[in-house]
Amino acid sequence: MKNILIEDIPKHLGKEIVLNVWVYNFRSSGKIYFLQLRDGTGHIQGVISKSDVSPNTWQVCEKLTIESSLQVTGILKEEKRSPSGFELEIKDLKIFQIAEDYPIAKKEHGVDFLLDHRHLWLRSERQASILKIRDEIIWLMRDFFRKNKFILTDTPILTPTSCEGTTTLFSTDYFDEKAYLSQSGQLYLEALAMSLGRVYDFGPTFRAEKSKTRRHMMEFWMLDAEAAFMQHEDNLKLQEDLVVFVVNNILKNKKEELRILGRDLKFLKKVTPPFPRLKYKEAIEKLKSLGSDIKYGDDLGADDETRLTKEFDKPVFVTHYPAKIKAFYMQPDPDNKEFVLCDDLLAPEGYGEIIGGSERIWDINILENRIKEHKLPIKDFAWYLDLRRYGSVPHSGFGIGLERTVAWLCGLDHVRETIPFPRLLNRLRP
Ligand code: ATP
């Protein structure tokens, strides 16, 4: 007899099994204990009858508290009324530890209290479901890129310069000089694309943004993809395919977690290609007609994105932003140099931007001018300019934020629940 996981119990129906578990909840009638047990892979109800166990075991049972840890031995029975479809008739239990009074009760707590107790809050069924969906999204994204012949490669976290100016960077000492925590691996990924053709990285990203919104964190995970010989149109298609692949497979593979979260699946089922597209100019007009006071030349704020996405039931691309409000490396639109070949993909239901992408400038003179116009230190970009000196090719890429994708697919109000230990404007602990 070996210890098994709750997830695997269907194979053991009618047999005696041993489970290592925590007590999620319990109730007692004086003669029978009903224990809600969890082991990380699932939940099961355990039943202990006073008449079936030794007086010693019953005494142990009476000491149990929420989150106590124990090993239970019992017979696995079918039980149609229980959510798992099974019940464990417990014959024996061994205690690892009797938990002290658990600070998180089943009643409502304020979000600050829960975030202060994040190390414990993670044990709730809801938080565990979110983390399982996060895990699945990561595997799906990797699977998608592998199927499309992209190579996973790593870009540095400690960097000497920024991708887009230093205002939102966290700095640290690097012996005698300053280093910055990476806010995107894109520039390095462009170098890797010139070696490997199609590449992606996936890692933590840091932005010292004084943004207290429901979609900004100081530390978040981003997947950047970059491909040589890929241009604007194919870049959009790749993003669309990725999002459709992830959503379809989450709907298929994570039904139970989505049920626990109470996610309304109606919207997710509508995520089919093609996604609607709006040029920046059209987006501004639409927003004005919806009552926004946005002006031509403004970036879309979080409220504008929410407003716009409520008009569509699928993700929507906003493309062709004015060059002036975008990063220095974006390729000018050949039809009108005032604009660049870029896109933001906005998730529906008010979620807003989850992807930012663009075709990159591949002509060295245009790029040099842009670096100067943006008043960036040209010597720091010498290596980046080299990429345009030796076999330069059209290339494009994008970055997708993991936490915003998780928030959207799980139907959460805020990104703070999408990462185990969120780093927010006023929160570095626990
Ligand atoms: P925003 O305008 O919403 O601040 P951005 O335009 O700065 O985002 P990009 O630089 O294009 O974002 O980054 C790519 C993706 O990374 C975004 O689409 C988003 O999913 C994610 N992202 C960016 N900043 C944050 C953040 N502070 N917290 C969580 N995710 C983020």
Image (cartoon, grey):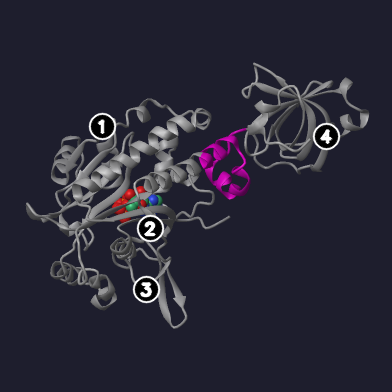
Query: Is the CB atom of the residue marked by disc 2 within 8 angstroms of ligand 1's nearest atom?
Result: no
Distance from disc 1 to disc 2, alpha carbons, whole Å, reads 29 Å
Of pointers 2 and 4, the one earlier in the residue sequence: 4
Residue 155 inside the magenta-drawn segment: no
Q: How many marks?
A: 4
Of pointers 1 and 4, the one earlier in the residue sequence: 4
Q: Residue at x 34, y 56 (%)?
A: 199
Quadrant containing the N terminus is top right
Residue 111 inside the magenta-drawn segment: yes
- Residue occupied by mark 4: 93
Of pointers 3 and 2, the one earlier in the residue sequence: 3
Tell me the mark number nearer the camera, choosing from 1 and 2: 1
Residue type indicated by callout 1: Phe
Tell me the mark number nearer the camera, choosing from 3 and 2: 3
What secondary structure is marked by label 3?
loop
In this rendering, does residue 212 appear at all? no
Distance from disc 1 to disc 4, alpha carbons, whole Å, reads 54 Å
Q: Is residue 344 left or right of residue 155?
A: left
Kindly check if marks 1 and 4 are in contact, taking CB atoms under 8 A apart as contact.
Answer: no
What secondary structure is marked by label 1?
loop
Tell me the mark number nearer the camera, choosing from 2 and 4: 4
- Residue occupied by mark 2: 210
Quadrant containing the C terminus is bottom right
Q: Position of residue 125 (x, y in %)?
A: 59, 35
Which stretch did the figure color magenta? 107-132
Residue 160: image tag:
3
Q: Is residue 107 left or right of residue 1?
A: left
Residue type indicated by callout 4: Leu
Kindly check if marks 1 and 3 are in contact, taking CB atoms under 8 A apart as contact.
Answer: no
Q: Farthest residue in the bottom direction?
A: 176
Q: Position of residue 191 (x, y in %)?
A: 30, 65
